[in-house]
Image (cartoon, helix red, strand yellow):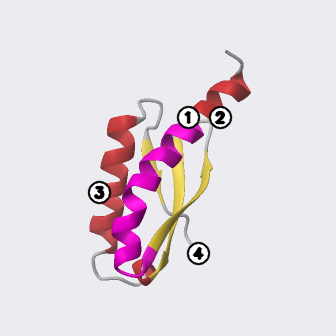
């Protein structure tokens, strides 16, 4: 499998996890957006809508990270880039 094929496979797996979580976020007026997956295995996401300023933002991110790490072995961590 080529590098690009493997990267696309990893991205599709991460997207599948985020898609399963999205309805719960959207129910509260928020969402999550995949920004990139680095070569080092870091998934970069952005919380949108009400999730951006929610007091439970860190818990939401921890839950997303736990799900992604559990289901996508190639991922090492999840981060939100600093603005």
Q: Please, what secondary structure does the residue beneath circle 4 have?
A: loop
Please tell me which residue lies in front, 18 or 82: 18
Disc 3 to disc 2, C-alpha distance: 23 Å
What is the spatial separation of the Cα atoms under label 2 and label 1, in whole angstroms? 5 Å
Q: Secondary structure at mark 3?
A: helix
Q: Considering only order in the chain, which callout, 3 or 1, is on the residue closer to the N terminus?
A: 1
Label drawn at residue 63? 3
Vertical side of 62 occupied by 27: above or below: below
Residue 21 placement (x, y as % from top left)? 37, 58
CA–CA distance in space, label 1 to label 4:
26 Å
For the residues marked 3 and 4, what is the alpha-carbon distance in whole angstroms? 22 Å
Q: Nearest to the eye among marks 3 and 4: give it.
A: 3
Residue 34 falls left or right of residue 60: right
3 or 2: mark nearer the eye: 2
- Tell me the quarter of the image containing the C terminus: bottom right
Q: Nearer the viewer, mark 1 or mark 4?
A: 1
- Number of on-image labels: 4
From the image, give the main secondary structure of the stretch colored magenta: helix
Q: Residue at x 45, y 54 (%)?
A: 18
Magenta-span inclusion, residue 13: yes
Label 1, residues with CA under 10 Å away: few <14, some 14-19, many ≥20: some
What residue does disc 4 label? 83
Check if mark 2's residue and mark 1's residue have beta carbons within 8 Å. Answer: yes
When the figure is inspected, residue 30 is found, relative to residue 67, above or below; the finding is below
Q: Earlier in the sequence, mark 3 or mark 4?
A: 3
Q: Residue at x 29, y 82 (%)?
A: 55
Residue 8 colored magenta?
no
Q: Which residue is mark 1?
A: 10
Residue 59 locus on image (x, y percent): 27, 66
Instruction: Tell me the residue that label 2 is attached to.
Output: 8
Rate crowding at label 4 as few (under 14), some (14 to 19) or many (20 or more) other CA atoms within 10 Å. Answer: few
Tell me which label, 1 or 4, sits earlier in the chain: 1
């Amino acid at each position: 499998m080529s590098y690009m094929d493997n990267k696309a496979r990893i991205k599709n797996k991460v997207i599948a996890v985020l898609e399963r979580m999205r309805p719960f976020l959207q129910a509260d007026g928020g969402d999550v957006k995949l920004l990139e997956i680095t070569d080092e295995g870091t998934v970069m996401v952005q919380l949108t809508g009400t999730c951006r300023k929610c007091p439970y933002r860190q818990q939401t991110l921890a839950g997303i990270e736990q799900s992604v790490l559990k289901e996508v072995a190639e991922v090492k961590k999840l981060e939100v880039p600093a603005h």
